[in-house]
Image (cartoon, rainbow, N blue to C red):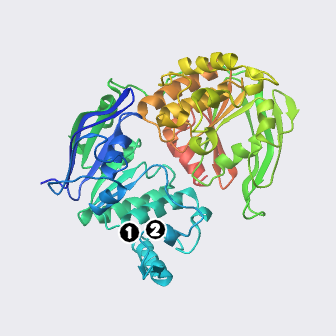
Amino acid sequence: MSLLEMRNIVKEFPGVRALDGVSFTLEAGEFHSLVGENGAGKSTLMKVLSGVYPEGTFEGEILVDDSARHFRNIRDSENAGIAIIFQELSLVKELTVGENIFLGKEPSKFGVINWSELYHRASKLLQDLHLQIDPRVKVGSLGIGQQQLVEIAKALSQDAKILVLDEPTAALTESEVETLFGILKDLLAKGVGMIYISHKLDEVFAMSDRITVLRDGKTVSTHDAADIDRNGVIAAMVGREVGDIFPNVTHEHGDVALSIRNLTAYSPDVPDKKLVDNVSFEVRKGEVLGIAGLMGAGRSELLMSIFGAWSGKFSREIEVEGRRVEISSPADAIRSGVGFVTEDRKRFGLILEQTILDNMTIAGLRSISGQIITNRTRESIAANGPMKSLRIKANSTLTVAGTLSGGNQQKVVLGKWLLTNPKVLFLDEPTRGIDVGAKQEIYAEINKLAEQGLAIVLVSSELPEVLGLSDRVIVLHDGKVTGEFTRREATPEKVMAAATGNI
């Protein structure tokens, strides 16, 4: 008897069959990973399981403990012992940690919330999970990694027997990932079954008992983790054998495109605390400069300060193609020829309710469409260029950006900045949360842009990505440059030693 069985699930949207007869099983105490490219149907399947897509909107059966279940809403799924942690956090940032954990389930008597009991239970839950988080602080004051752990604590407060985690480590530090996996191992030992969705195959293989691959809304295969390797999983995901994921190319470097001198950035919350400390560097035309470092090293703060988007104090000298420029806002940066693909595409990169067309043209609207009156024909022609070259999967440029998969959303963000004709392009975590196939396409585009003479500054938490794409690597530790390596010199051991301050 399986803890969970989903049989022949079919889910259709107008013009699209998102799930086409998908079947999936989960055993008690099992860690079962669900992998596939963006748009393969993973999240849709989990929304069926969670009651987000209620009975009647899909075909197929759901059985829990061998009994058929009918979920009319999310609460029905929760009552069946299913807790789902989606990639997009569902916390209310104005409320405290404790209030978020028990939102809708507050201990009360005669309609009056027992706040003492709520915070006592929240504190005990956090302690049991070994999370050093004050249940009385507002969630909005926490970092994104701690917010993710609160989301997990919220799910576990339901005493779930089936736990679904959708990209839970995307925003976590290495120590937070270790904490999470320790929590999950304890729960597995207690018989909790887990469905794990992640594009990080190292995590998938480290934890999984079984791995199921979806492609184009269909179940491709299910394997014991011990019976398949990484290349086998990737081949099943993309429908083809995958060789070296990073193209082996050599870029011709031209004149200096961007020069940064003595950049220092301070914390917006602790004004005297330096997050970037006197950093200087150059990047040339046609060069991919990688910036490596552990989370908190100052990588994103460095880019945001150059771009004029950092909320704390900062100072620096900037030259673009040998000309001194003053950048105090993103608008100044765009006029100076600097583009910025941020690490949080949904928050800073896209207007999800708007079309691909509107998102693509917004940053370069004046040059594309005109100074005073917009010209939609010119905008449409301009947007069709990146739409085709980046192979964005959508019916047209009038498709709403929020309906796209993560990989296609990322391509829209990249296309937006390419339409500004930048001289320098910042890429901050450009492949976060996207699948292997989309990553390869992004990597190929980065190399093509470098070959065309664009200067690229790349930040990534994935060390193989930095080493595989960069011509030169600068390493940050505690806001300072602790190492600089050519492509040939940059080994994982050397870069990690510099990133941890062991130099």
Q: Pointer 2: what residue?
A: 101
Q: Pointer 1: what residue?
A: 157
User: Quadrant location of residue 237?
Assistant: top left
Q: Could you tell me the amino acid type at mark 2?
A: Ile
SS category of the residue bearing label 2:
helix
Q: Residues within 10 Å of mark 2 (few under 14, many from 20)?
A: many
- Evaluate whether residue 251 shows in this view: no
Which of the pair 464/357 is nearer the observer? 357
State left or right for residue 75 relative to residue 146.
left
* Image position of 132 with respect to 447: above or below: below
* Residue 149 drawn at (x, y percent): 47, 61
The circle on residue 68 is none
- Evaluate whether residue 222 shows in this view: yes
State left or right for residue 413 relative to residue 159.
right
Work out how far the residue at label 2 is from the one at label 1, CA to CA, in angstroms.
7 Å
User: Quadrant location of residue 475?
Assistant: top right
* Residue 276 drawn at (x, y percent): 72, 52
* Image position of 170 with respect to 136: above or below: above
